[in-house]
Image (cartoon, grey):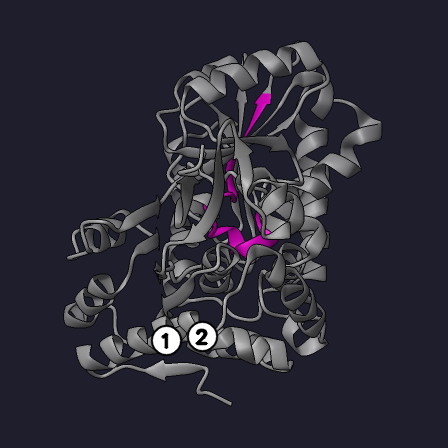
Amino acid sequence: MKTLICPVESPADITAAAAELRAAMAQTEFHPGDMLSIFEDWSDALGGRELGEIPGVVFLRLWLRRGTLEPLIERELGSQALREEWLADGRARLKAFPLGIVGHWPAGNVEIQPLLSMTCALLGGNAALVRVPSGLVEVTRRLVEALAQSASGQLLLRRVFLAAFSHGRMDLHQAMAQSVDGAMIWGSQEAVLNVRALPFPHWARLAVFGPRISAAAMDAESWSNPAALPSWTQRIARDVWQFDQRACSSPQVLFLQKKPGRSTADFVSALERAFVAENRAHPRPAIAASLTSAICHARASWLLDNAARQARFPNSPDWTLLIGSGSDLPSPVQGKTLTVLEVDSLIEPVSKFDGNVQTLGLAMADPGKEAELAELAANRGVDRIVKLGRMHVFVPPWDGVELIRPMVRLVRHVPSTD
């Protein structure tokens, strides 16, 4: 079995790996339909308890299922892609072909992101050259070992090179960029700008997924309905807990539309109970000292800056609810810290969105008003508007961009006999 994650010491290592990837592509073709069975087996292999503790593995298993990927391929490339056929387009015909090697620069804050990014390129028939962030090397190795269990998985891994090297090795980043035909770039503003400045070939296509935040909102009829409280608060808690609130799709703030004559106290208490229950079901095994400090500072500053504010939290830094009013987006703290703000109208906060909000999770009783709010949110830069509890459901387009199609070439053939 090949080495799953390779420490890289020199640009020559990258160049040699790219040459091997191109040779593997020339020897064996993989079409989108070929991937479905391989990924389905991989999903099954990830079902063990020892892997289930890795954040995001449940999500990755669902992503790899045929039921998830087949509709995605059909939507982005057409149903004929699954049958390896050309699509008639008037007197011409169209078919998707791979770009070649796709480089991946995933962020280091989501454990499954290197593999999620990689699968998008593989579905287009490409090879994948992936820089695995230092903190994710061991987790990624364990997840890829599950793929390598089958013969078809090992064959597919010939099209994959997982490279481990320090983020400060610009010579290795440059060698990666020079070796690829496309790139999927994730991470902070600084990371994205640094990668985009690398010397890519002039024909390389770049798909960029930079840092963004997400928000949730509930209208007065939804949060004030006692019968629906347990369901809605559980949904919110689960959206906060997944990925430890570090993903772009994690809600950092919950806006509640005020209801005249009705306090939000009962709702906040129900939300606190949901947070306690979720923490009991999915306790955090460890927490970085820097995050603990940020959480403690956020709690203290929230309460000291305004006597009218409230907060709910345990003695530990496991989770935090910061309760107040206002329509401005707060600075994200993460670490399962949710700011709950009352507003007169949900139009107020959504009107202030500036393109940095990726996902808006909603609970609204009036479909007409929800449609109006969704239209406003879309015009203010929001790319995903979903029901609370589904903020992390990875259904493309993602950040308003398709995931497979940008990394394929749509070849047009007009027969010379026509």
Q: Three-letter amino acid code at disc 2? A: Gln
- Residue that lies at the very extreme toward the bottom in this rendered image: 1
Extent of the magenta region:
240-256
Instruction: State the residue lying farthest toward the right.
Output: 227
At 57% from the left edge and 70% from the top edge, which residue is drawn? Answer: 285
User: Which residue is nearer to you in this view: 378 or 13?
Assistant: 13
Residue under the image location 16 percent in, 52 percent down: 197
Residue 257 sits in quarter:
top right
Q: CA distance from mark 2 to mark 1?
A: 6 Å
Say if 132 sits above or below 217 in the image: below
Q: Nearer the viewer, residue 92 or 48?
A: 92
Q: Quick check: 222 left or right of 250?
A: right
- In this figure, which residue is indicated by the disc labeled 2? 27
Q: Is residue 78 magenta?
A: no
| Residue contact at pointers 2 and 1, CB within 8 angstroms | yes
Q: Which residue is mark 1?
A: 23
Q: Answer whether residue 311 is visible to the viewer in this image.
A: no
Q: Is residue 180 left or right of residue 340?
A: left
Secondary-structure class at tag 1: helix
